[in-house]
Image: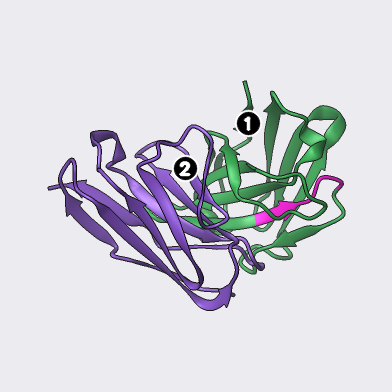
Amino acid sequence: EVQLVESGGGLIQPDRSLRLSCAASGFTFDDYAMHWVRQAPGKGLEWVSSISWNSGSISYADSVKGRFTISRDNAKNSLYLQMNSLRAEDTALYYCAKVNVIVPTATGAFDIWGQGTMVIVSS
Amino acid sequence: AIRMTQSPSSLSASTGDRVTITCRASQGFSSFLAWYQQKPGKAPKLLIYAASTLQSGVPSRFSGSGSGTDFTLTISCLQSEDFATYYCQQYYSYPWTFGQGTKVEIK
């Protein structure tokens, strides 16, 4: 079964750091680009970051640029999001998602999503 | 950034109705557009990609069309399990952006 499982969320104080993980299974992880997408409580979807299959192409939303770092370990079938200098507005459910095509870039629709991990930034 | 505007933001419909949701982009692009369905407490589910290609396993009552700046998602015969929120998303240029969502409710 193709599956993504996020972990690492929790309640964290402003300006602190948190690292999210996404464990992939059921597909050849290093064939596909991966993304993080977040959803604030009661709000819509916001794309956060992307990484190509070989980490050669990485992009960020302006709202997290300079504070968040995406990475992957293909040997461990895992995706990560290092979040520094967290703000209240980063409070959201964070999803990892797999693209639906094998391409050198990170382009593609998201055909597999995890269940999400909740990050709450509050003092 | 390309802004994606969905209309309507919500709609009420009955089982069996034909439903159309529109997504307008602030600048034109080809077919790098996807539609997702999200139910409460669940992750989004891919319905349509490349503007009009039905994702495997998705019922054929869902269809997508459009190019340039105007795209549509049509549900030909609404079923009870289709009551959900629908999002469009462009993956043509960074930052990738979603529409604000269209909530389909029971009339």
Q: Quadrant of residue B92?
A: bottom right
Q: Colour of chain B?
A: purple
Secondary structure beneath dot 2 equals loop
Q: Pointer 1: residues within 10 angstroms few (<14), some, or many (20+)?
A: many
Residue drawn at x 58%, y 55% is: B50
Drawing shade for chain A: green
Range shown magenta: A49-54
Check if residue B28 falls in the magenta segment.
Answer: no
**Would you place residue B10 above or below residue B38 in this image?**
below
In the displayed structure, A15 sits above or below B84; it is below
Residue receiving disc 2:
B44
The residues bearing labels 1 and 2 have C-alpha atoms spaced at a distance of 13 Å
Amino acid marked by disc 2: Pro
Label 2, residues with CA under 10 Å away: few <14, some 14-19, many ≥20: many
Identify the residue at image location x=44%, y=63%: B99
In this rendering, position of residue B48 left or right of residue A55? left
